[in-house]
Amino acid sequence: MADPEYAAAAVAIRPFEGLARLVIAYRIENDLTQEQLAELMETSAPAISRLESGQHQPNLETLRKFAEVSRRRLLVGFEDEVGNRELVGV
């Protein structure tokens, strides 16, 4: 992390790593393969693999499909510099 470019890249992908862990956990808890989850989400297994890599920035439609399949509500929000948050369900 001494390299500023590496540190910046690590910070940039951190949210995607969290999402990857969530998707992987969902698959494991529901005994699904990447192929099965892809079918449920009407996408491809390579797309699920990229999502689970934690280094891919998914689009809103992919997140919406995962929320639907996992029976969750997708929230999108903004946070200002002092921590005030505004969220909206998508």
Image (cartoon, grey):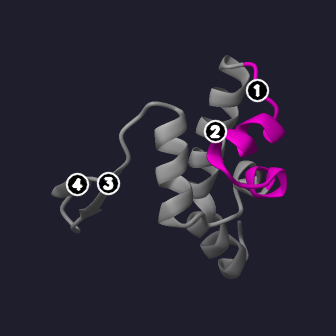
Of helix, strand and loop, which one carries label 2? helix
Give 37 or 58, whichever is nearer the viewer.
37
Q: Is residue 10 magenta?
A: no
Specify the quadrant of the image occupied by residue 78: bottom left
Of helix, strand and loop, which one carries label 1? loop
Going from N to C along the chain, the mark reached first, 1 or 3, is 1
Please identify, in this view, whether the residue under mark 4 or under mark 3 is nearer the observer: 3
Q: Is 9 left or right of 87, judged from the image as shown? A: right
Question: Would you say the residues marked 1 and 2 are in contact, meaning their CB atoms lie under 8 Å apart?
Answer: no
- Say which residue appears at 67% left-offset and 50% top-offset: 42
Relative vertical location of residue 17 with respect to residue 26 in this rendering, above or below: below
Please identify, in this view, whether the residue under mark 2 or under mark 3 is nearer the observer: 3
Going from N to C along the chain, the mark reached first, 4 or 1, is 1
- The residue tagged 2 is 23
Q: CA distance from mark 2 to mark 3?
A: 18 Å
Going from N to C along the chain, the mark reached first, 2 or 3, is 2
Q: Which residues are magenta?
A: 31-49
Characterize the magenta stretch by its predominant secondary structure: helix
- The residue tagged 4 is 88
